[in-house]
Amino acid sequence: MGAAPQAPRTRVTARARDLRFDAGSLSLNLVATVGRRPVGPVERMGDAERLAAWCRGVGLTPAPGYAADALLRSLHSLRDAAYDIASSLLDGHHPSPVSVDLVNALAAGEPPAPRLELTADGVRPAPGSDLLTENALLSAVARDLIGLVSDESRRERLTTCASEVCRMLYLNPASGRPRQWCSMRRCGNTAKAAAHRRRRSATDGDQPWSRPSKTDTT
C-alpha cells in the first residue's frame, strides 16, 4: 500500500476554521464543516456553539430543548456519509453501503410541513412552524443530498476547489462561467498571490549578479 498523500504545510488559521455557507446546497454546507479534506482535515463544527452558528447560517432552527451533543454526533455521522457519497460523483469511487443506508434512513423521516396563520394584518408563517426536531433537521439535510444526487443538472455542477489545500466540494452556478475556486476572495486570491510570487522569484533568478559599486556600500 502506498503512502497517504500529504497536504501542503500551511498554518491552521482562524479563517481556516470559519464556517462556510457558500457550497451551494444544504448538504454540501454540512460537508464544508470540515475544511482541507481529505489530507489535512480541519474541524469547523466541533462544539455546541459552532453547531448553533451553523444552524443559523443554513436557516435550520432546532426546537427548544434539543440535545446539542447528540445532534452534533448525528450531524458528524451524516457529514461523513454525505462526503463519501458526494465525492463519489467526482472521483468515481463506490460509496460505502453504510453511508447510503444512513442517508436513506435519515431521509425517511418527513420534516414537518410549514404552516400559515391569518392575522388582522394578513397572512404570515405560523409561530414555531420552522422549529425542527433532531430527526426532522437530519431529514432535511439527507433529503437535500438525495436531491443533489438525483438531479442531473446539479450533479454536473458539482466540483472541487482547485486549491490543493482546500479541496472543498461546491456547486458551480447554474448560469455563467464555472468557477475554478470555491471562492475568489479566499482560494482564488491566495492562488493568484502565490503565482505572482513564483513569477517574481523566477524573474529575480534570471537577473545577473553584480558586484556593488563603492557608492553602494554605505
Image (cartoon, grey):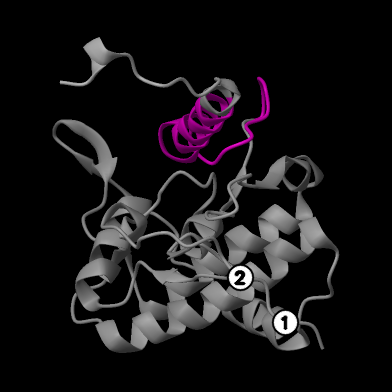
In the rendered image, which quarter contains the N terminus?
A: bottom right
Which quarter of the rendered picture does the C terminus lie within? top left
Q: Amino acid at mark 1?
A: Ala
Q: Is residue 135 above or below residue 117?
A: below
- Residue at the limit of the structure toward the top, as seen here: 215
Whether residue 178 appears in magenta in the rendering, the answer is yes
Residue 130 in view (yes/no): no
Query: Mark 2 = which residue?
Result: 6
Q: Are marks 1 and 2 in contact (CB under 8 Å)?
A: yes
For label 1, the residue is 3
At label 2, which amino acid type do we have?
Gln
Q: Determine the secondary structure under disc 1.
A: loop
Which SS class for mark 2? loop
Q: Which residues are magenta?
A: 174-202
Q: Main secondary structure of the magenta part?
A: helix
Residue 113 x %, y %: 45, 60
Left/right placement of residue 118 relative to residue 154 reads left
For image coordinates 79% across by 83% down, the residue present is 2
